[in-house]
Image (cartoon, grey):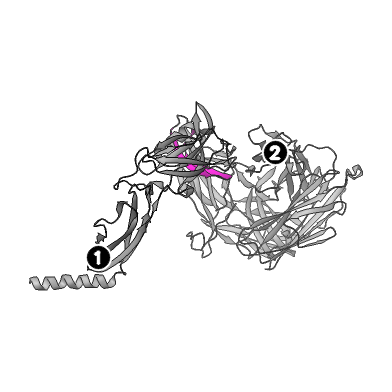
């Protein structure tokens, strides 16, 4: 029985040995300095069958050997099944420590005499691996520095030590001599740090939290530290207890703190610590910059709805991975009653706090439609719940082009921005954009540079726009210094073509006008109706939308780091019809609350007009429709608030349009649309002798209850889900005409 068991054990050992990788041995020497027997050899073993035994040429049997003098050393490693490998290496002897390659220098801020002063906190990396004494870590105070700049040496444990420098010119590299406690010399090249130039912190957005919830949000922008030294960001409660810490790095950054309860918070910048918690705590205690932010209390009767809007390609109502099912950036959702609006971020995620109660949620979009949960989807707001929105594309491809401009003044630059957008998940293929500007002005430059320049016509041949992609073209033109141009209307137009077939060509071209003015308020809001017939009137039977441009200029005495433009829409405008236009700079855009439009330009670094007049301007734009039915005499009045950093808002003069019929204006041919049957119960046939682009159905209170993209002359519209009553149908035809017909739902 004993013989049999032994045979089984040996067979298992042989199997293990055959399956194992070959035995390998790697030796890494750390050399001796100043004859102090402080060399060592690190032995690394791989493969074979552990455990291993070690036989060194100096009779040591440990894996690594310490306290070595200069010389040649070998080791024989034997594994569990008797396989042996022998390796050797040389420990050299040096009369001094090696130079600065063993040290990592970083600039930090510590306190000197109560006031923050410039220091370098230098982490000594690597040297300790050269300084072993009979296997023990290096002593508590092994080094003596022989240079005025080396003020203090701190040791924070057996593996991390630091030198604090001061009393030297920031940014200058010094060679510092030192000796260890045995008299062994060395030199270090150290660069003294700069006094901290704290990043500018701007609060971009604050979302309140329910009294019993943790759904508050603080969003911030930070510029880079003045000398690109690393910082981190802390969020602390009013009592200074830590909530969260985030690394901010050494570049401009956007930061967000989420899941917050109502209350006051300190947002604190710190110089990023190195080493263990002891040093980190000391540095953070001495050096920081902070602002206080309040997360409003929304009360106890409150809840949160959040989720992700995505393209449900396989129509299974289950959200796949980002790579499998595209997220819908900037998707807008409408919650009724209210209405309340939420805008998804760049990853398709949305979050909205609402008063407790029953709602329905429906997505606002022209070319994609929510299909799961089927709209309008019921939502019972209580606590926190997740509702993901699954979308389907209504058309294979729809690319859109928009244009906006700054002010035009004699002798100054005129700035246009062209925005190209892919409103669908399909690729556009290569694109061609043609911009025609008024011959009264001259071309300066564009970014990107045009493919071709032919007089007042610029052409760009560009690569494809992917799913929901957006890109812009910046054009700078010169208005001649001729006061005789004041009052002149400058025309501009742009067209956009895609290699792949665009199912909705109506939005592939657009035109705009701007009037040359003399002096003007640089912070204003201007309105341009779709007919462009009047600056004061909105023609009910002709105009279809209003283009708003919100223009601003930094006329202060320093750079504006962040600009935020807000616009609380009046009841005469329909938030659900909003379309984002071109903007002068990269910005974040959102529709929230009960119709609050917000443009956030984080880290815009807008120079003041005294330094760079041409670059001190900016603008944002959007397109929106009036809420229907619109009665003659209705005033569409709108203002905007412009925030430059922490200053009080600049409130623009009201932009006022008065709704009227086009009496005395050249007639526009309006095509007819037939509805049948009327009254109807379930389905309504809409027919036209001109192809229809889009249909909207409005209830008597002006709310859009059906919105649908169409590419045919006849369509059967499902109205079975509508309540009994009167409705207005608005059909947009592909020749630009807009037709309105009423019907009764029984």
646 to 709, vertically: above or below:
above
Question: What span is in magenta?
Answer: 241-263
Q: Secondary structure at mark 2?
A: loop
Q: Quadrant of residue 467?
A: bottom right
**Cβ atoms at labels 2 and 1 below 8 Å apart:** no
Q: Earlier in the sequence, mark 2 or mark 1?
A: 1
Circle 2 residue = 640
Q: Is residue 303 visible?
A: no
- Residues 49 and 300: in front is 49
Residue 639 bears which disc, if any? none
Circle 1 residue = 79
Q: Secondary structure at mark 1?
A: loop
Q: Residue at x 67, y 54 (%)?
A: 696
Image spot of residue 285 (x, y percent): 46, 32
- Residues 296 and 469: in front is 469
- Residues 603 and 46: in front is 46
Lateral position of residue 639 relative to residue 385, left or right: right
Disc 2 packing (10 Å; few <14; some 14–19; many ≥20): many
Q: Residue at x 50, y 48 (%)?
A: 306
Q: Residue furthest top?
A: 113
Image spot of residue 625 (x, y percent): 71, 48
Q: Is residue 523 magenta?
A: no
Disc 1 packing (10 Å; few <14; some 14–19; many ≥20): some
Quarter placement of the N terminus: bottom left
Q: Quadrant of residue 398?
A: bottom right
């Amino acid at each position: 029985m004993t013989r049999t068991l032994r045979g089984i054990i040996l067979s298992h050992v042989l199997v293990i040995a055959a399956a194992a990788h070959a035995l390998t041995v790697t030796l890494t020497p750390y050399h001796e300095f100043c004859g102090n027997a402080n060399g060592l050899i690190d032995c690394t073993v791989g493969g074979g069958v552990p455990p291993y035994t070690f036989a060194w040429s100096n009779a040591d049997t440990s894996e690594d050997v310490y306290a070595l003098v200069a010389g040649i050393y070998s080791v024989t490693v034997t594994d569990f099944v008797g396989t042996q490998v022998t390796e050797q290496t040389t420990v050299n002897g040096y009369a001094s420590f090696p130079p600065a390659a063993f040290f990592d220098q970083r600039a930090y801020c510590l306190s000197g005499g109560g006031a923050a002063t410039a220091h370098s906190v230098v982490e000594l990396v690597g040297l300790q691996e050269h300084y072993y004494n009979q296997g023990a870590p290096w002593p508590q105070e092994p080094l003596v520095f022989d240079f005025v700049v080396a003020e203090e040496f701190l040791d924070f444990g057996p593996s991390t030590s630091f030198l604090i420098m001061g009393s030297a010119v920031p940014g200058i590299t010094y060679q510092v001599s030192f000796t260890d406690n045995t008299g062994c010399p060395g030199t270090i090249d150290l660069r003294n740090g700069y006094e901290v130039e704290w990043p500018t912190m701007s609060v971009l957005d604050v979302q309140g939290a329910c009294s019993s919830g943790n759904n508050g949000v603080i969003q911030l922008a930070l510029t880079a530290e003045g000398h690109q030294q690393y910082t981190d960001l802390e969020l602390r409660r009013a009592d200074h207890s830590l909530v969260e810490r985030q690394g901010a790095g050494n570049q401009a950054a956007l930061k967000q703190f989420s899941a917050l309860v109502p209350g006051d918070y300190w947002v604190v910048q710190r110089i990023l610590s190195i080493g263990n918690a002891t040093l980190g705590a000391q540095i953070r205690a001495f050096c920081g910059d902070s602002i206080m932010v309040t997360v409003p209390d929304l009360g106890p009767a409150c809840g949160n709805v959040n989720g992700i809007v995505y393209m449900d390609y396989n129509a299974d109502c289950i959200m796949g991975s980002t790579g499998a099912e595209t997220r819908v950036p900037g998707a807008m959702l409408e919650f009724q009653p209210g209405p309340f609006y939420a805008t998804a971020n760049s990853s398709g995620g949305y979050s909205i706090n609402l008063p407790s109660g029953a709602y329905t949620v429906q997505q606002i979009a022209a070319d994609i439609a929510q299909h799961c949960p089927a709209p309008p989807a019921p939502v019972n707001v209580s606590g926190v719940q997740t509702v993901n929105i699954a979308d389907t594309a209504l058309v294979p491809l729809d690319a859109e082009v928009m244009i906006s401009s700054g002010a035009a003044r004699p002798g100054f630059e005129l700035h246009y921005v062209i925005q190209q957008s892919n409103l669908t998940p399909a690729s556009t293929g290569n694109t061609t954009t043609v911009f025609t500007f008024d011959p009264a002005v001259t071309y300066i430059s564009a970014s990107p540079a045009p493919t071709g320049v032919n007089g007042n016509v610029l052409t760009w041949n560009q690569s494809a726009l992917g799913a929901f992609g957006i890109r812009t073209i910046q054009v700078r033109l010169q208005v001649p210094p001729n006061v005789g141009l004041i009052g002149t209307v400058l025309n501009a137009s742009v067209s956009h073509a895609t290699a792949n077939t665009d199912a909705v060509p109506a939005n592939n071209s657009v035109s705009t006008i701007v009037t040359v003015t003399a002096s003007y308020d640089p912070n204003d809001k201007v309105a341009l109706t779709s007919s462009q017939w009047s600056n004061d009137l909105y023609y009910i039977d002709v105009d279809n939308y209003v283009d708003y441009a919100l223009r601003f200029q930094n006329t202060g005495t320093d750079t504006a780091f962040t600009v935020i433009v807000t616009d609380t829409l009046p009841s005469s405008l329909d938030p659900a019809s909003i379309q984002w236009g071109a903007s002068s700079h990269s910005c974040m855009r959102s529709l929230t609350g009960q119709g609050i439009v917000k443009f956030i330009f984080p880290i815009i670094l807008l120079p003041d007009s005294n330094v760079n007049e041409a670059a001190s301007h900016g603008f944002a734009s959007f397109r929106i429709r009036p809420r229907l039915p619109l009665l003659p005499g209705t005033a569409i009045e709108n203002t905007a608030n412009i925030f430059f950093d922490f200053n009080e808002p600049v409130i623009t003069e009201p932009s006022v349009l008065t709704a009227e019929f086009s009496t005395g204006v050249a007639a526009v041919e309006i095509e007819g649309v037939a509805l049948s049957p009327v009254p109807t119960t379930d389905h309504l046939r809409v027919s036209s002798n001109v192809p229809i682009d889009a249909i909207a159905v409005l209830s008597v209170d002006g709310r859009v209850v059906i919105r649908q993209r169409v590419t045919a002359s006849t369509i059967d519209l499902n109205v079975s889900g509508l309540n009994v009553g009167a409705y207005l149908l608005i059909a947009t035809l592909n020749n630009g005409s807009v037709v309105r017909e009423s019907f009764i739902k029984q």
